[in-house]
Amino acid sequence: MLLTRASEYALLSLDVIRKSQTPIGVGQLAAELSIPKSFLAKILQSLAKKGILDSHKGAHGGFILAKKIDEISVHEVILAAEGKSPAVFDCTQYTQTCPNGSIGTCAISPFLANFQKRIDSFLHNLTLGDIL
């Protein structure tokens, strides 16, 4: 699992939100992006809880960016949307889900761990400003 629809929808929503000067409501975003409103609402609330978005209530409420796009890493967006850090392989040292329970003795475990570290570093250093 590296990116699911939740991450995709989070990134697409952030692109629309960043272009707006005023808060954008979930209904408007869902319609514009053709995303189920209830699913999008959960994603946006997660982004707000992690400090990526600010949520405004009321008739003219909605969501706006809480930080500049150059201050938001892709990793933190994925973490907020997915509820966990992105893992390339299910059997990396980070997830402790080795299918045969042999993380310490697996011949490819060091490669997988190194690969995951590189992906993590890349996503931590990649900002929304880099991709949007």
Image: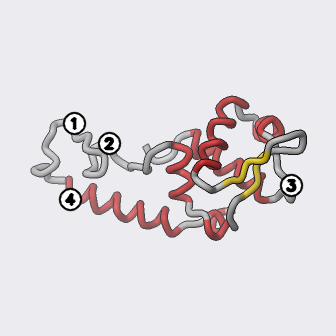
Image quarter of residue 32? top right
Disc 3 packing (10 Å; few <14; some 14–19; many ≥20): some
**Residue that label 2 marks:** 90
Considering only order in the chain, which callout, 2 or 3, is on the residue closer to the N terminus?
A: 3
Disc 2 packing (10 Å; few <14; some 14–19; many ≥20): some
Residue type marked 1: Pro
**Residue that label 1 marks:** 99
Q: Determine the residue positioned at 16% across, 36% down.
A: 100
The disc placed on residue 22 is 3
Disc 4 packing (10 Å; few <14; some 14–19; many ≥20): some
Image quarter of residue 91? top left
Q: Determine the residue positioned at 28% across, 49% down.
A: 92
Q: Is residue 4 left or right of residue 108?
A: right
Question: Mark 1 touching mark 2, by CB under 8 A?
Answer: yes
The image position of residue 99, as x and y in percent, is 22, 36
Q: Determine the residue positioned at 84% across, 56% down.
A: 20
